[in-house]
Image (tube, helix red, strand yellow):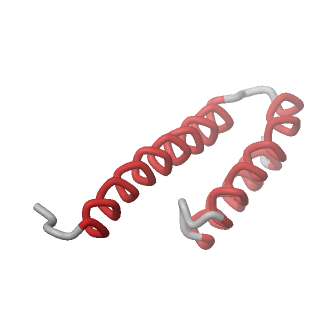
Amino acid sequence: MANHKSAKKRIRQSEKRKLHNKYYAKTARNAVKNLRDIENKEEAKTLLPNVCSLLDKLAKKNIIHKNKASNLKSGLSVKVNNM
């Protein structure tokens, strides 16, 4: 266990950030999964910009890596276009 006051604060901060990041990463995974499960092309086209925006925001805040966001967006775009 930490002995210094600043170390104890750092532990509290990292735990809080971990929960915050975990929530948003899970939200993104669910959004991607829902988009992949859609069969209707028109519905998928309307949902794609929202999912891409969400991935960009998470990459900007370093919750997910920028290359992972790019790979997900690319794969989803290909899937929607090939419907």
Q: Is residue 41 above or below residue 32?
A: above
Return the x and y of residue 37 as percentages of the image width and height: 62, 30
Q: Quadrant of residue 57?
A: bottom right
Residue at point 78%, 45% (across, down)? 80
* 25, 52: nearer the viewer: 25
Return the x and y of residue 64 as percentages of the image width and height: 54, 62
* 46, 41: nearer the viewer: 46
* 69, 21: nearer the viewer: 21
Q: Quadrant of residue 9?
A: bottom left
Residue at point 49%, 51% (across, down)? 21
Residue at point 76%, 52% (across, down)? 52
Q: Quadrant of the N terminus?
A: bottom left
Return the x and y of residue 76 as percentages of the image width and height: 70, 51
Left/right placement of residue 50 relative to residue 9 reads right
Return the x and y of residue 32 as percentages of the image width and height: 62, 42
Q: Is residue 73 above or below residue 79?
A: below
As drawn, the residue found furthest toward the left would be 1
Question: What number of labels is visible?
Answer: 0
